[in-house]
Amino acid sequence: MFNLKINYIDMSHRENINMKSLFLGLQKTMKEDLESLRSNTPHEPTKGDGSENVWVDFFEKYLPKRYSVTKAIIIDYEGNRSDAIDIVIYDTQYTPFILNKRGVIYIPVESVYAVFEAKQEISKSNIEYAGKKVESVRKLNRTTAPVVDKGVIKKAPELFNILGGFLCLDNSWVDSIDSSKPFTDCISNLNGLEQINIGCVLNDMSFVNTQLNGVFETKFSTADETLIYFFLKLVSELQKLGTVRPIDLNKYIDQLDSQ
């Protein structure tokens, strides 16, 4: 007869992981990286590229793997193009083509979940500039195609609103953005296609904008939870979008000489 000895692990004395503490450590590291870039990089374009890379690295490490992240130009089936976008969160699993021409990446608009502008600080001019960047993506012509589910053809699903965001290190206004009238006026005056849905000001607060029944509302993080609030809110908003809609490839085929 075998003697079976079972060792039980006493879990009662194990300390729980403090998720907030982990994110605060990451937030501190990101602040240090961005502040170091600002202090030690006099060349503005290089400084801008460095800031974007810090955010791209963050998204690549922590977003679910279904999402890809890059700098890119967005295109539609008619050949229209967006402005150059600092950070694009997009799909690769269901996207049939992504073009890379001498280091410049072109992504079909149907595959895009969210676009972000990354700056050193938040200001009226930077917010308005970011709104124009977001608009250049949203005004592109997106296609959608019927889907086949268990042998049944279902109508093409409705398109979702591509998220627009803003990322930076500092606040240029005197007051924190939650009490700054210039911020409120600026963010609420962006038109529909320019609207910024979510943003992170690492050294101040993060924000999420919603509009329900014509009422515009902005919610803010606390001053010490900028990164964790922004990240969890972003993932939540991405989840609401579901999966990118299927591309109507016939629209792209129609642009070819071959039919």
Image: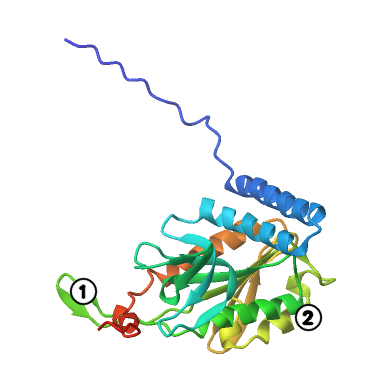
Q: What scheme was used to colour the molecule?
A: rainbow
Q: Specify the label residue 208 is tagged with.
A: none
Instruction: Tell me the kind of residue under disc 1.
Output: Val
Q: Is residue 70 above or below residue 219?
A: above
Is residue 43 among the parts visible in the rendering? Answer: yes
Say whether residue 107 is left or right of residue 43.
left
For the point 69% across and 81% down, the residue is 128
Say whether residue 250 is left or right of residue 114.
left
Q: Quadrant of residue 175?
A: bottom right
Q: Quadrant of residue 42?
A: bottom right
Q: Quadrant of residue 201?
A: bottom right
Considering every residue shown, the one lying at the far top of the view is: 1
Image quadrant where one finds the N terminus: top left
Depth check: give the residue in front, 32 or 203.
32
Q: Is residue 239 above or below residue 123?
A: above
- Give the x, y percent position of residue 111: 42, 71
- Give the x, y percent position of residue 147: 25, 76
Instruction: Tell me the kind of residue under disc 2.
Output: Pro
Q: Is residue 233 above or below residue 4?
A: below
Q: Between tags 1 and 2, which lies in front?
A: 1
For the point 20% across and 72% down, the residue is 149
The earlier-in-sequence mark between 1 and 2 is: 1
At mark 2, the secondary structure is helix
Q: Which residue is mark 1?
A: 148
For the point 71% across and 50% down, the residue is 33
Q: Specify the label residue 182 is tagged with.
A: 2
- Give the x, y percent position of residue 195: 60, 81
Mark 2, Cα crowd under 10 Å, few <14 / some 14-19 / many 20+, is: some
